Amino acid sequence: MTTLTQPPQESFRLSQLLYDTRYRSLTIQVVAFILLMAFFWWLIANTVANLEALGKDFDFGFLGQRAGYDINQTLIPYTSGATHARAALVGILNTLLVAFMGCILATVIGVIAGVLRLSKNWLVARLMTIYVEGFRNVPLLLWIIAIFALMTESTPQPRDFREGGGASLLFDWVAITNRGVYVPAPNWGDGAGVMIAVFVASLVGIWAWRRFARQRLESRGQLLPVMRVSLALFFIPTLIVYFAFAAITGGREQAIVAAGATEQSSLADFAQSQSGLNVCLIPGSAASLNLERRLMADDLNYNAVPFTDEQGALAGFQSGDCNVVSLPSADAGPYIANGGFEGQPAVLSDTILRGNPVEFERPVLGGFNFEGGIHLRNSLIALWLALSLYTGAFIAEIVRSGILSVNKGQSEAAFALGLRPNRVMNLVILPQALRVIVPPLISQYLNLTKNSSLAIAVGYMDVRSTLGGISINQTGRELEGMLLMALFYLLLSLLISGLLNIYNASIKLKER
Amino acid sequence: MTKSLFLGALTAVGLTAGAAGAATLDDVQARGHLNCGVNTGLVGFAAPDSNGTWEGFDVGVCRAVAAAVLGDPMAVEFVTTTGQTRFTALASGEVDMLARNTTWTFTRDNDLKFEFTGVNYYDGQGFMIPKELGVTSAKDLDGATVCIQTGTTTELNLADFFRVNNISYEPVPIETNAEAQQQYLAGACDVYTTDASGLAATRATFENPQEHVILPEIISKEPLGPLVRHGDNEWGDIVRWTLNALVAAEEYGITSANIDELAQGTNNPEINRILGTEGNLGEMIGLESDWAVNAIKAGGNYGELFERYIGESTPVGLSRGLNAQWTNGGLLYAPPFR
């Protein structure tokens, strides 16, 4: 009797693809993949065919064409003569600005509201509940429009700031109008660069000190004063530099030179003798600001001819671009002796101060609007506040859940050690809560960034309004514009989540 | 079940995608109504009345085309479009035609691939400003805040005008006419700029229209007219000649009052050809012989539409000006029906 030692050689049959569990899953996947590819092929082919039927091609050349429209808020120089690509870039920067400001404010609001929601104070806890539920459960677009409408309808028009108009500047420095808030703008004088460098260095110093204090705490259990030192580092070095420069250069006088004036006549007399004043200025510099203040104090009308530096302004005066300029020194002799002038230059009796490292320019009511200062448009403020308050409500819940996720025994143990409540929060609860908080926080930042595309509702010129709105409309390149915008939002989101994932990796539980 | 659902969805997508390419006339007739893109609300040109029925000068064109094609002026589905959405709506086939104060320009005709079928209102861009500001010329607007509808030619004209005159301004981009009106009245902008006819229409709805002036400068040419997609010439011809029929009707004295009488036949062969009692013009553009009768009956001839919705007796109060018949020194000139 023979026995079969070998099992019969199984030949592969086609039906096994369907009935044999070893192959079935593979079959299903292959079929699904083919169907998916077919679907995409059909979608793309259909798009191409329809575009062809409409006589349209796929071309990004429109980005190089003249845009032709103006944008109100531009962080980089832009005119209507620039290209669509430039307009898109302006929009991208505006998107980044509002997203950045929004993420910061949303975090601040969210953390405060989240902690306060756990407060033992009944009123505070309930108020925060109302805030969170109110903002979380009403669409963001409504909040944006509501805040914008509130700001437009409840604030005075610029012309109400005229005498008898009933509105006045806040603290004499800030104008809140229905077109936005005008705040003083910093103008930089001599030593501003040094001052800013020192300020940045002290920020680095604060970071280094906190790091050092933390290491000291962990290695030796020694508590170093962090808050006091940080505050001191923040203010003292910068202020020292400011006052040093203010004392050395701030009080220095400098001459004003006018073309075709009588020697030592005053600015007002010179203005009367001329048909118009053209003043060479360097916008944003402290000395020019002082010159303008001098002109305004005499109630003189003038045209500002802008230059980027003092050399340029002097050259402009020499070639006759303007008839008034302020020299960088009190002694005009060497400069006038230099020669090569269009008109006869003469030194006026009025002088101006060189100016402190930083001087603030007040908003002043001009013809239709306030001029000078920084104009924070209502559209930006409304969008910023709405995005921050809306996302802040979600972050509050994330923070609350993070804190609640830390076992009660942790805080009880910390209290048993004799730690004070704020130390318990900072040293025990928050480091553990952060592990829970950060991952969902990332998606809230992404939400905020993407939600900023609702900007068009209040006329904020973000990338959706420039590239995705006006540019598409003027050129008819819907598909290209939308693809570019999608690509931008995709890259931005990946970048944000990438950066925050690095942070997340640094705070997560290190298992050894 | 799932499979059939998927295939069903696929077919549905395929059908909608295919629709854009097919003959628009057949689509409209099969559908039983015309999809017409109009303004979101501009009194006199396109706005719903108290019963929710759309009416206005632009709406009248839609109704005339619907009457010519389907015999029923009410068989129109009005799709509201903003300055930004109108071209996408037309290009994607969501609407069959656009009658929405749209300026005829070279790029829109050629680059955006549309077909302008004529001009129903010769307009120009103007500025409106509160009287109390005391401004008398647009050149005094240095530093002003200007409300502007985005995605329009006015936006580009505005940029050019201020650039040429070397004066600065602050643009406030706005989506719809209603929003612009609200912003302007709240004082969030000093000036509102759009086509002069639009300004007059907007001002007509103000509580105190006399407190606002329209500045004398007209800074652009804005020939406004209905448009259709490029590539379907038969459909373009229908819209073009419907508009021409309305204009010619005024020229030959055909009104909604006497049209029934004239349609019996007259001594004037041109009127007979328009009204279909002579020749076969209707057949040539694929319609019934009484297509023009229906179109004119829908709301009257061009002059009647003008007087009823935007003429001097209405709150909008526009004079005929450039929009008078060529015989009266205007620019309206319908080619011969022959």
Image: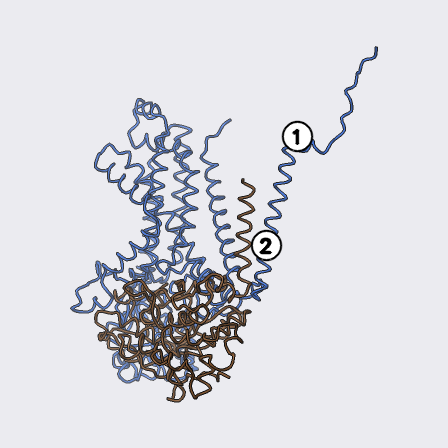
Chain colours: A blue, B brown
| Label 2: which secondary element | helix
Q: Say which of A88 and B44 sits in front.
A: B44
Residue A311 visible at all: no
Give the residue at mark 1: A19
Q: x%, y% of residue A137? A: 32, 44
Local packing at callout 1 (Cα closer than 10 Å; few below 14, some 14-19, many 20+) is few
Left or right relative to A14: residue B298: left
Subunit under mark 2: A
Q: x%, y% of residue A397? A: 34, 38
Local packing at callout 2 (Cα closer than 10 Å; few below 14, some 14-19, many 20+) is few
Farthest right residue? A1
Q: x%, y% of residue B37? A: 42, 65
Q: x%, y% of residue B158? A: 39, 73
Residue A210 visible at all: yes
Residue type indicated by callout 2: Ile
Farthest front residue? B264
Mark 1 vs 2: CB contact within 8 A: no
Q: Which quarter of the figure is the N terminus of chain B placed in? A: top right
Subunit under mark 1: A
Left or right relative to B6: residue A345: left
* Residue in view at x 47 percent, y 61 percent: B31
Residue type indicated by callout 1: Tyr
Seen in the picture, residue A191 relative to A346 is either above or below; the reply is above
Left or right relative to B287: residue B307: left
Give the residue at mark 2: A44
Viewer-side label of 1, 2 = 1
Q: Are marks 1 and 2 on the same chain?
A: yes
What separation in Å lies between label 1 and label 2 (alpha carbons)?
A: 35 Å
